[in-house]
Image: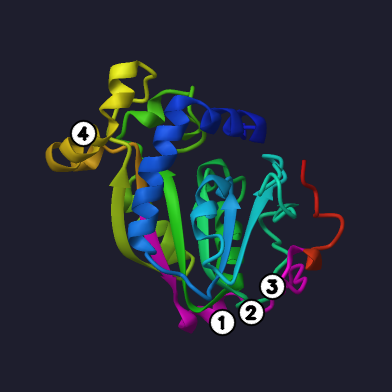
Amino acid sequence: MALDVIDIRAFYAEALGGIARRLVAQRIRAIWPDITGLRLAGIGYATPYLGMFKGEALLSAGFMPARQGVARWPVEEPCLTALVDPDGLPLRDGSIDRILMVHDIEMAENLPAMLDEAWRVLAPGGHLLMVVPNRRGMWARFDHTPFGHGRPFSRRQLIQLLRDAYLAPEYWTFALYMPPFTRAFLLRSAVAWERIGAWLWPGFAGVILVEATKQVYAATAVQGTQKQKTIFGAAIKTVPASTRQCS
């Protein structure tokens, strides 16, 4: 069962969620230090991490699957999130330079179709970055965080998954070595846990981050597939009214 957007939002409002966001965001920023002038789409519940690119990316918007629900983002500015069918994104072919997937593939009902759709909307040579629960990590074993829901993955499984979707994995890193508990001393020592964990037990992090590149030679693999292709220009207003649902 997919986790509701209300539960995910509540997690990030708590102390543990705030720490998790900061640690994961540091890894994401290290992978993408500068995306000035690029078009960025967050899929799943990526909005806690899109904010650091706002004002830098040419376009930054969040697309949340219907199974999860949608939450307004940004809170006090024009809405840049939409409720969508993940197998039919309201975007042109090749219209997005960067895709960030968080709290998404582990909940997917049709993962191959969803990744095919991500491939379609990525520009040639575009990059997809996924944040995925690590099946060897502790966070996947506790369901009081979003990372403990759905299906966790191993690195080997992700490699095969991406290759099947004509996406070439190029860079790997890990985050969330601290136990997913709310005790104050653990929260205060989160940075130390990250440093020690990366050195002593690198394979047991809570999440895997993998960046993959679209392989343009795979175009024939998706030819003939007709999906909704609404123009996504400089503003979210180009998304049809049926998908523009912020709350």
Q: CA distance from mark 4 to mark 3?
A: 48 Å
Mark nearer the N terminus (4 vs 2): 4
Residue 150 visible from this viewpoint: yes
Label at residue 192: 4
Q: Which residue is mark 1?
A: 220
Labels 2 & 1 near each other (Cβ < 8 A)? yes
Q: Give the residue at x 40% y 34%.
A: 19
Whether 109 is drawn above or below 142: the answer is below
Where disc 3 sits, the SS reads loop
Q: Crowding near pointer 3: few (<14 within 10 Å), some, many (20+)?
A: few
Which quarter of the rendering shows the N terminus? Answer: top right
Mark nearer the N terminus (4 vs 1): 4
Please provide the residue range marked out in magenta. Answer: 209-236
Label at residue 223: 2
Q: Give the residue at x 71% y 46%.
A: 76
Q: Crowding near pointer 4: few (<14 within 10 Å), some, many (20+)?
A: few
Q: Give the residue at x 40% y 41%.
A: 22
Mark toward the viewer: 4 or 2 = 4
